[in-house]
Image: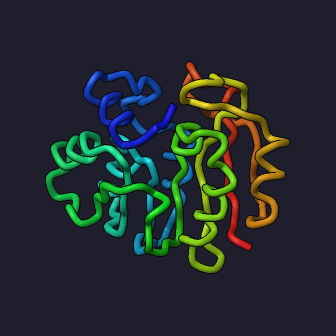
Amino acid sequence: MEFNGDYWENRYQENTARWDLGNISTPIKEYIDQLENKDLKIIIPGGGNSHEAEYLFNSGFKNVYVIDIATSPLQNIQRRIPSFPKEHLIQADFFSLDMTFDLVIEQTFFCALSPTLRPAYVKKMHAILVPNGKIVGLLFGVPLYENHPPFGGNKKEYKELFKPYFDIKVMETATNSVESRAGRELFINMHKK
């Protein structure tokens, strides 16, 4: 099955993208809370309803972008945060993105992609990050579904995938996940090589 724009738009229209927490996840919130440079250029790929973008924006980060292949979640962000710059809400395929960033916030995008796209994801992340740019966020560290998102995995396979392109500073089971995800998420902090 192809997980294209229509697939994702339908999931949002039918409210079947059930891994949306309805709020920012604690590990990402705590990471953002310790950031001092509010000028960082940040992107949230496959951002969905992007409670992370909302939290960043309301915390004074004004250089925040969200890219999603579906339209509805971007419209949801605009409704929730009318002052969020429309030009920072990009409705497009992530793999067509032609900009660079200081920081990528990874929250459920990786697990939404078909596992066959993971090598392309890693290369594209490397390409869109400035020198010393970072990917920070969460990956599911357990097996999940085989024929539909979210797709899981494990630390060993992720390390092999990212190691050629990133210095893996942290890839450990998150200790502050929401209860429904406790023990199932890996917190990552990886720097572009």
Residue 84 at x, y = what percent?
Answer: 22, 58
Q: Give the residue at x 66% y 49%.
A: 118
Residue, far front: 1
- Which residue is nearer to you in this view: 169 or 49? 49
Residue 107 at x, y = what percent?
Answer: 52, 44
Answer with left or right where residue 137 lies relative to residue 87. right
- Which residue is nearer to you in this view: 56 or 137? 137
User: Where is 84 relative to 10, above or below?
Assistant: below
Residue 189 at x, y = what percent?
Answer: 67, 56
Image label count: 0
Q: Give the residue at x 45% y 57%.
A: 94
Residue 51 visible within the image: no
Asked where in the image residue 9 lies, by quadrant, the reply is top left
Q: Give the residue at x 76% y 42%.
A: 172
The way the protein has been coloured in the rendering is: rainbow
Answer with left or right where residue 149 lies relative to residue 171. left
Residue 190 visible within the image: yes
Q: Quadrant of the C terminus?
A: bottom right
Answer with left or right where residue 103 lies relative to residue 65. right
User: Where is 140 relative to 107, above or below?
Assistant: above
Residue 49 at x, y = what percent?
Answer: 33, 40
Q: Give the residue at x 81% y 50%.
A: 159
- Which residue is nearer to you in this view: 167 or 59? 167
Answer with left or right where residue 115 lies relative to residue 51. right
Residue, far bottom: 131
